[in-house]
């Protein structure tokens, strides 16, 4: 179960939104046990995408995860 404001990582690519597996987002709404709304932001703080996703497309972070940065300019639409 995910919680409000929890940081999560994508487990699948969402090319239509310019997102890739491993991108980080924050849970901003919980619609039901299987669907949450996640905000993905650029390093500047600008919202890049706001998506309602199945919890099967997300995972929680743990001590085995390393945070990295990638350029949106190289993302394929």
Image (cartoon, rainbow, N blue to C red):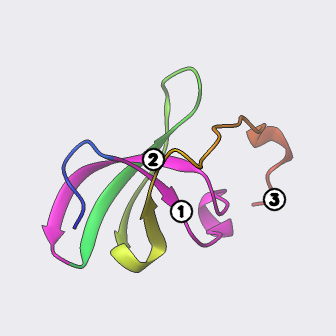
Badge nearest the viewer, 3 or 1: 1
Residue 54 left/right relative to 25: left
The dot on residue 10 is: 1
Vertical relation: 56 (above or below) 10: below
Q: Name the residue under label 2.
A: 25
Question: Which stretch appears magenta?
Answer: 7-33
Which of the two labelled residues, at mark 2 and mark 3, occupies the earlier sequence position?
2
For marks 2 and 3, give the CA distance. 19 Å
Name the residue located 16 percent from the left edge and 76 percent from the top edge. 33
Q: What SS does tag 3 mark? A: loop
| Residue count near mark 1 (Cα–Cα under 10 Å), binned few <14, some 14–19, many ≥20 | many
Q: Mark 3 points at which residue?
A: 76
For marks 3 and 1, give the CA distance. 17 Å
Q: Pointers 2 and 1 in contact (CB under 8 A)?
A: yes
Q: What SS does tag 2 mark? A: strand
Q: Which of 69 and 50 is in front in this view?
A: 69
| Residue count near mark 2 (Cα–Cα under 10 Å), binned few <14, some 14–19, many ≥20 | many
Farthest top residue?
Answer: 44
| Quadrant, the C terminus | bottom right
The answer to if 14 sits in the magenta stretch is yes
Name the residue located 54 percent from the left edge and 62 percent from the top edge. 10
Q: What SS does tag 1 mark? A: strand
Q: Which of 45 and 56 is in front in this view?
A: 56
Q: Which of 42 and 65 is in front in this view?
A: 65
Residue 67 is situated, as x and y percent measured from the top left of the image, at: 63, 37
Q: Nearer the viewer, residue 15 or 13?
A: 13
Residue 8 is situated, as x and y percent measured from the top left of the image, at: 43, 53
Residue 13 is situated, as x and y percent measured from the top left of the image, at: 65, 69
């Amino acid at each position: 179960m995910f919680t409000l404001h929890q940081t999560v990582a994508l487990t699948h690519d969402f090319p239509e939104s310019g997102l890739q597996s491993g991108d980080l987002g924050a849970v901003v709404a919980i619609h039901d046990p299987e669907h949450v709304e996640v905000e993905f932001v650029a390093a500047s703080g600008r919202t890049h995408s706001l998506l309602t996703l199945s919890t099967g497309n997300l995972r929680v972070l743990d001590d085995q995860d390393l945070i990295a940065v990638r350029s949106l300019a190289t993302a394929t639409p």
